[in-house]
Amino acid sequence: MRLLYELDDEKKLFRKTVRDFSEQEIRPQVEHLWETGEFPYDIVRKMGELGILGIPFPEEYGGAGGDYLAYAIAVEELARVDGSCAITVEAHISLGTSPFYYYGSEEQKREWLVPLAQGRILGSFGLTEPEAGSDAGNTQTRAELAGGEWVINGTKCFITNPGTEMSGVVTLTVVTDTRPDGKKEISNIYVPKGTPGYNIAPKYKKMGWHASDTRELSFDDCRVPESNLIGKRGEGFKQFLDCLDGGRIAIAALAVGTAQGAFEESLGYARERKQFGRPIAAFQAIQFKLADMATEIEIARDVTYKAAAMRDAGVPHTKEAAMAKLFASEMCMRATTQAVQVHGGYGFMDEYAVSRFFRDAKILEIGEGTSEVQRMVIARELGLR
């Protein structure tokens, strides 16, 4: 008898495959990557060869032919070992590649989706700006048609994956006109790396995710063909909202994996660390922390898998995606905080993994929609306008 939410044999085997990869290929390099901030090229290329960078896309377009639940499982397993590798995959699939799959023309899919899904190049998505964070509709970057080309001017910030040797293309939300109601017409346009006028700043120095590539992008009279428009003109905001639904599920999975990694470190430490003549796992104060962590992780995993299954089924899931992202990210912050507490003074030391998990956790309450925005989305979906 299959239990509710129990994965089938295929998904269990897939989880084991990604977990084995994470343990064998990523874990030995984690400390080095954290300390140096080097981008893990060898790991990312191997993930491409394994099909991880194209999990939810059809085989005809270079993908692995999997579904969103499989993708969520993969992100979770990667984050259980290293958040930098996990966010590299998440930003590439959910944000950089998805616009081509969902809204691109057949020609755009052949030219860009195929190499992106195969992992030969990495994709980025340029949404956030200095004046357009939670207020994403306040996009200032503009694109004007001139002689059959889009001329782009503006700045994007906190963009993942644009500046590596593997980076190939960024998709941008840009203002292309003013609508009859006076609001901005926002469209989605892609810009290949190396296009004149497309400037990539040095990497940010971040609290966490040290080995991931995060940068500011600026566009100074950057010209691309009119055919670089993705989907219909004026539907960029709608496209990005749909992509964010998927992205929030993946961020929830990343949070589950991060919390799981911190929990496993804490469980092992509690069994080994002795105080007052016995392992600290024998003390109820520690037992309760671990029990709470395990319970909340399991709940977050269930709501994340449910949202992923709903996306696979093609049913509305905006509310469920926001709920999963909200609960999982805040759970992760609680879990990693308690993981540091279980470790005591050692949890404050960089040589212990929980220090890294703790610093990786905070961004999950911010990226792809803050916790406050998730509550706004949920309230709106409940009819509270």
Image: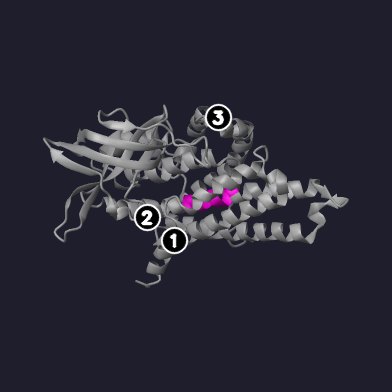
Residue 76 image point, x, y percent: 56, 47
Q: Decide if residue 333 is on the left or right side of residue 231.
A: right
Residue 287 image point, x, y percent: 75, 58
Which element type, helix, strand or loop, lies under badge 2?
Answer: loop
Closer to the N terminus: mark 3 or mark 2?
3
Residue matched to label 2: 134
**Residue at 23 percent of width and 33 percent of height:** 222
Q: Which residues lie in the magenta part?
A: 249-258
Which element type, helix, strand or loop, lies under badge 1?
Answer: helix
Q: Decide if residue 352 is on the left or right side of residue 162.
A: right
* Residue type at the position of mark 2: Ser
What label sits on residue 372 in the rendered view?
1
Rendered position, 122 above or below 3:
above
Magenta stretch: includes residue 93: no
What predominant SS class does the magenta segment belong to? helix
> Could you tell me how far apart the alpha carbons at marks 3 and 1 are, in whole angstroms?
33 Å
